[in-house]
């Protein structure tokens, strides 16, 4: 009987663990942003949402597709709308979100992502499904002669520092940056997914100077919006090869994607 009681107790604990509610924000404000023009709408709608974490307070903004990508730790190209759900507001409406995490401690980015997933399901009635499909990509690999980056001695979180950027001429110092983080940072500059295939582990210190494209849009879109032509300078692929000792090469790879099967405009707070 004691053994049977123990089994029942274990099963009850296991059931309680499997039914535990997902982490959620204590309070959250969701507000539709006000645009000033179609050009700004297109640019902001294609910029990956970033989480600003200060103590228990979390802030972010972006279109629904960008918010979903950030919440599920994906890139923009990995999130799409199903053929049955193609509402355009998912890419044009920008939402500003301010929230507070439960407890007194500062949440990790992973915890914030889980709470953002719960918020999107509750406020936007979000329903998603996962798929894997082969698609054209770029791969970041080590160039002949080896990498020109230095293993970092900094033990803090990865950070970047501007080193005199002006206009589209970007000069950035990366400190304790993994190649995965670096790929995520520069992804908007490419017209297809960029995957880390360097085999380099750990964090590195390096600087990179290149001529930037407006984030998340192609050169043709930039011209259509009447944005100024980029200043002459090194394109990012040449900069990566010459300054970092890495190459960007075309390939085709299976990529995990997230499909939005249904969503509704948020009702606000």
Image: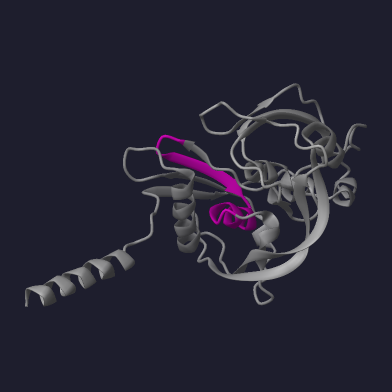
Q: How is the image coloured?
A: one colour
- The answer to whether residue 121 is visible is yes
Which residues are drawn in magenta? 54-73
* Residue 56 place in picture, x, y as percent: 40, 39
Residue 24, above or below 150: below
Task: Name the residue: 55% across, 44% down.
Answer: 60
Q: Quadrant of residue 6?
A: bottom left
Left/right of residue 99 with respect to residue 192 in the rendered view: left
For the point 80% across and 25% down, which residue is it?
A: 166
Residue toward you, 229 or 34: 229
Q: Residue 110 in the image: x percent, y percent?
A: 47, 49
Please name the residue shown 90% across and 46% down the image: 223
Nearer to the camera, 223 or 158 = 158
The quadrant of the picture occupied by the N terminus is: bottom left
The image position of residue 167, as x and y in percent, is: 81, 29
- 98 left or right of 223? left
Q: Residue at x 72, y 47 (%)?
A: 187
- Total numbered labels: 0
- Quadrant assignment, res 238: top right
Q: Quadrant of residue 91?
A: bottom right
Residue 107 vertical position relative to residue 131 in the rendered view, above or below: above
Magenta-colored stretch includes residue 6? no
Q: Position of residue 154 (x, y in %)?
A: 55, 26
Along the line of sight, which residue is nearer the eye, 127 or 156? 156
**Above or below — where is 185 with respect to 45?**
above
Query: 86 or 156, which is in the foreground?
Result: 156
Q: Does residue 253 appear left or right of residue 13 in this picture? A: right
């Amino acid at each position: 009987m004691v053994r049977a009681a123990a089994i029942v107790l274990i099963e009850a604990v296991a059931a309680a663990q499997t039914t535990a509610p997902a982490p959620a924000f204590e309070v959250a404000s969701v507000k539709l942003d006000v645009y000033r023009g179609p050009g700004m709408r297109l640019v902001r709608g294609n910029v990956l949402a970033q989480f600003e974490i200060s103590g228990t307070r979390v802030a972010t903004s972006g279109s629904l597709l960008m918010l979903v990508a950030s919440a599920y730790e994906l890139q923009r190209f990995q999130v799409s709308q199903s053929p049955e759900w193609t509402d355009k507001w998912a890419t044009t409406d920008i939402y500003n979100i301010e929230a507070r995490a439960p407890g007194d401690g500062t949440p990790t980015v992973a915890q914030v992502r889980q709470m953002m997933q719960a918020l999107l399901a509750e406020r936007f009635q979000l329903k998603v499904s996962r798929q894997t499909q082969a698609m054209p990509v770029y791969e970041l690999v080590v160039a002949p002669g080896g990498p020109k980056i230095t293993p970092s001695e900094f033990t803090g979180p990865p950070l970047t520092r501007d080193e005199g950027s002006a206009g589209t001429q970007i000069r950035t110092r990366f400190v304790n940056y993994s190649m995965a983080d670096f790929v995520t940072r520069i992804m908007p500059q490419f017209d297809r997914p960029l995957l880390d295939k360097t085999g380099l582990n750990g964090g590195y210190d390096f600087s990179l100077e290149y001529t930037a494209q407006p984030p998340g849009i192609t050169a043709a879109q930039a011209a259509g919006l009447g944005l100024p032509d980029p200043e002459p300078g090194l394109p990012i692929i040449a900069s990566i090869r010459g300054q970092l000792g890495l190459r960007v090469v075309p390939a085709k790879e299976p990529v995990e994607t997230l499909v939005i099967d249904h969503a509704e405009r948020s009702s606000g707070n």
